[in-house]
Image (spheres, grey):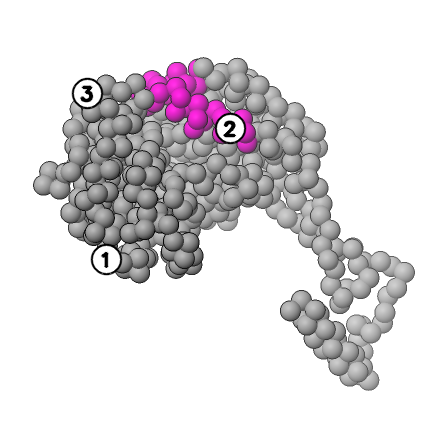
Amino acid sequence: MDALKQLVERQRVWFLTGHTLPVEGRIAALGRLRTAIVRHHAAIEAVMKADLGRCRMESFLSETVLLLDSLDKAVSHVRRWAAPRRVKPSLLNFPSCDRLLPEPRGVSLILSPWNYPFLLSLGPLIAAVSAGNCAVLKPSECAPGASGLLADLVGETFAPEHVALVQGGPDTAAALLQQRFDHIFFTGSARVGRLVMQAAAQHLTPVTLELGGKSPCIVTESADLAIAARRIAWGKLFNAGQTCVAPDYVLVAPSKEAELLDRLASSMKALYGADARNSPDYARIINDRHHARLASLLELDNLFLGGEHDAKTRYFSPTIMRGVSWNAPVMREEIFGPILPVLTCPSLDEAVKCINAQEKPLALYLFTSNPKDAEYVWSRCHFGGGCVNDTLSQLLNDRLPFGGVGGSGMGHYHGQWGFATFSHYKSQVRRSTWMDLPLRYPPYAGKAWMRRLLERLVSCVRHERG
């Protein structure tokens, strides 16, 4: 505890000296991080194979490429993001110069999960460093290889008073949460997210919570079922389903259920073979506890495909379930694995009602050939973000904010949105001294005309904006 307190205080002292404020220093730090990721890219893929059984290409696509792209864009744009921006002044302040000045929040805590440990640790860190913060990282202990490599990578890139990584289990995370930070960024389950928010409340620390939930996938009667099945299967089985925005379940029109089920099964076999345990591209479940949890969700009478699993190797086959009820165990929690329930829904309106009756999900996917369906779903359903006729692709454009709503989280990041999350936008009104009208100062007797003038000015401004 004392060591953690000293670490945070050391970072706070360093932050208050202004070391993180020069933009050139931020760019240099981001450049060192990029160099380290490139140097360690083979090791990143190797530890992901050891921790998750994930193939090198999946790790390259989901960790290395996205981080390098995020770094390149941050380096290119951070000068503009960090620059004060002029704001149109109010007539009531005439004459004045009004500005917004982004400033770093201070010392940030980043708590990251095990499923994409490099992306979900270093992605928020890129935003924090771009915005001029110091940071303490705590990766998940469930991916020990990744945690150790992250410690080496951070240690050789940053001075500990700027960025430090702390390894450990839940007790370490709890001890960190007792410290006073200026911002906490957490990615993980809703259960732990509530604990993070409770701890943050002790110091009134702002939080960003990237959680998850049961992200639905709607397949309408007009959908191209061949495309839908292949893209749903890919999004569901990437990293063996251990993705916070993976399609959690499918709602399909009754008339299309049989064909979609057949196409989903064919697509899964095309991706990973008739027996996915022999595929070099198919990942494994992170640990025994999660493997047992997934096995407990199976209902043998509702299996359409798969269901095979091996606790010794943590293998869990691509699995499709049909005919499950909304009260079934597999529908009561986020699956976070390669099990895909397919439910029928008589209409798009009914699908929207079913989705809105649950907690607000992190993602939603709609497959349709009718643009009006997309307009209807996006206006009626409440969720973080999503795709029409694809899955997972909303993550690839960092001009779009990534984040949840309600039970799936609060706050967002990626690109400039991440810079904004780790920044406080300080307002400034700079008044001139060459004119100081006495009208606003007491005594107000005899100045009734001033009220009428101000009402007229406000009316004009409202009309101009309208």
Which amino acid type is shown beneath numbered disc 1?
A: Pro
| Residue 323 horizontal/vertical position (percent) | 15, 47
Q: Amino acid at mark 3?
A: Lys
In the depicted view, which residue is nearer to us: 94 or 151? 94
Magenta residues span: 43-70
Up/down of 193 relative to 54, above or below = below
Disc 1 marks which residue?
346
Is disc 2 surrounded by few (<14), some (14 to 19) or many (20+) residues within 10 Å? Answer: many
Which quarter of the picture shows residue 431?
Answer: bottom right
Q: Gap in Å between the C-alphas at discs 3 and 1?
A: 42 Å
**Residue 176 image-quadrant placement:** top left
Identify the amino acid type marked 2.
Leu
Q: In the visual, does 315 lie left or right of 21?
A: left
Q: Indicate the position of residue 252 as horizontal and vertical percent values.
A: 25, 49
Q: Are marks 1 and 2 in contact (CB under 8 Å)?
A: no
| Residue 262 location, quadrant | top left
Mark 1, secondary structure of its residue: loop
Q: For the C terminus, give its image quadrant.
A: bottom right
The residue to which callout 3 is attached is: 312
Residue, x 44% and y 23% (percent of image)? 60
